[in-house]
Image (cartoon, rainbow, N blue to C red):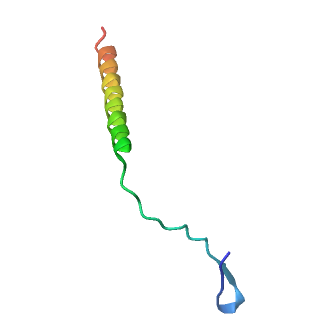
């Protein structure tokens, strides 16, 4: 752990900094998976809205 001495002899403890790395662009298969998951998510939200609307209009 990196310590520093302050005035009066107090020790100050700093957290370790994480390694920095450069992000890589998504591959073609990752892009395809993102599209598939977004379509699946939109279908789920659409079906939930449909069910909520159909239940709320029942007399």
Residue at 34% in and 39% down: 32
Q: Position of residue 39 (x, y in %)?
A: 31, 32
Name the image quarter holding residue 42: top left
Above or below: residue 12 compared with residue 26: below
Outermost residue toward the front in this view: 28
Above or below: residue 22 compared with residue 2: above
Q: Position of residue 35 (x, y in %)?
A: 32, 37
| Left or right of 8 on screen, residue 53 | left
Residue at 36% in and 27% down: 44
Q: The C terminus lies in which quarter of the figure?
A: top left
Above or below: residue 13 compared with residue 56: below
Residue at 30% in and 26% down: 46
Outermost residue toward the right in this view: 9
Is residue 11 or residue 21 the one in the foreground?
21
Is residue 29 or residue 50 the one in the foreground?
29
Residue at 34% in and 21% down: 52
């Amino acid at each position: 752990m990196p310590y520093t001495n302050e005035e009066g002899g107090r020790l100050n403890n700093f957290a370790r900094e994480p390694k920095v790395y450069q992000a890589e662009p998504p591959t073609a298969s990752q892009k395809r998976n993102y599209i598939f998951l977004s379509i699946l998510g939109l279908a789920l939200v659409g079906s939930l809205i449909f069910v909520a609307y159909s239940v709320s209009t029942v007399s």
